[in-house]
Image (cartoon, helix red, strand yellow):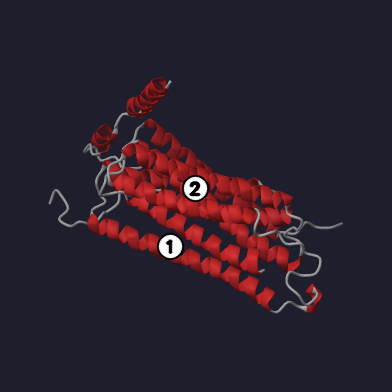
Amino acid sequence: MAHQTHAYHMVDPSPWPLTGATAALLLTSGLAMWFHYNSTTLMALGLLTTLMTMMQWWRDIVRESTFQGHHTMPVQKGLRYGMILFITSEVFFFIGFFWAFYHSSLAPTPELGGNWPPTGIHPLNPFEVPLLNTAVLLASGVTITWAHHSLMAANRNQSIQALTITVTLGLYFTALQAMEYYEAPFTIADGVYGSTFFVATGFHGLHVIIGSTFLIVCLLRLIKFHFTTAHHFGFEAAAWYGHFVDVVWLFLYISIYWWG
Amino acid sequence: MLRNLLALRQISQRTISTASRRQVKNRVPEMQKIFQEDNGIPVHLKGGVIDGLLYRTTMALTVFGTCYAVYELIVAAMPKKVK
């Protein structure tokens, strides 16, 4: 038989799973070297190889789909399941940090002064920059939906404009949050308040950066005509991820900034 | 005054829309031709010479990194003798 008689994608042999796994090894052992031996070489190598693996692996997926046409309907369905399952796993990741926060804040120990926020901690005013950040992320949810509908309606200029605004809002959030981190009157070392605050919001911020990067790649692909009105799963996946990041922020805002 | 304003609006709209059309050409059909060529090259190398360079660099860094990690592990497992 010269050609396949099924709709699934039998991928070409690829080195990226191997380099990716090795990169993870270098990252983890690099962390150990940094923590215990004050050396960052291994970790830097790990970061570099991780980045290179990601870029080439995802570049290959774009080639396989947009240029080679391997992403048939069943393949796309599998990718949708995959993205949904991945986001679900990330939800559970965050649930852990919310668990930690509520564990410490619902029954504050005597060492904290028996109250929450602990004695001596001056929390950030939730109605200042955090409220702006909430508005920024909610707005990005609106603009990405606008971009999606424009894309489906074959309105190129509007879809590019809307996605650009979405990316800008994501970067704006990151900049505002970085400034808040710098100006905050407490640090990660300030007891369990500092730990729960910076670990939860920190991981969230990392996910905003990841989401923004994903959206920037989508913007570039959109400009380069990769998406069609009916087939643009990469864009949809980025949109789902963006909405997920937004929802996590809303929970963070309500629990840690407002109630906490 | 109003006519000038309207004219300005028309010119800027036309400039912006034609600028975006002029700037980026649709290269997808070209790329489709390159990547669908029946030459047996796997997708991670099919884009050209740069693919090979990137691949070799990534692999070199990975192999070197693994050796270095194992070396550091061995060093860390043998405590230095304190005199």
CA neighbours of label 2 inside 10 A, class few (<14), some (14 to 19), many (20+): many
Lower sequence index among marks 1 and 2: 1
- Front-lying residue, B6 or A10: B6
Question: Are dots 1 and 2 in contact, CB under 8 Å?
Answer: no
Q: Chain of mark 1?
A: A
Quadrant of residue A224 within the rendered picture: top left
Q: Closest to the observer: A138 or B52?
A: A138
Query: Alpha-carbon distance for marks 1 and 2?
Result: 17 Å
Residue wearing tag 1: A86
How many numbered circles does the render carry? 2
Residue B21 position, x and y percent, is: 32, 28
Res A153 → quadrant = top left
Residue depth check, mark 1 versus mark 2: number of the one nearer the observer? 2
Vertical side of A84 occupied by B23: above or below: above
Identify the amino acid type marked 1.
Phe
Q: Residues within 10 Å of mark 1 (few under 14, many from 20)?
A: few
Relative placement, left or right, of A126 versus A235 is right
Q: Secondary structure at mark 2?
A: helix
Q: Position of residue A125 (x, y in %)?
A: 69, 59
Position above or below: A168 against A250: above
Determine the residue located farthest toward the left in the rendered image: A1
Label disc, if present, on residue A212 of the rendered structure? 2
User: Mark 2: which amino acid?
Assistant: Ser
Instruction: Quadrant for the C terminus of chain B, please.
Output: bottom right
The kind of secondary structure element at disc 1 is helix
Is A173 left, or right, of A121 in this rendering? Answer: left
Does residue B70 appear in this view?
no
Residue occupying the point 36% across, 40% down? A158
Residue at image coords 24%, 46%: A69
Chain for disc number 2: A
Q: Residue furthest right?
A: B83
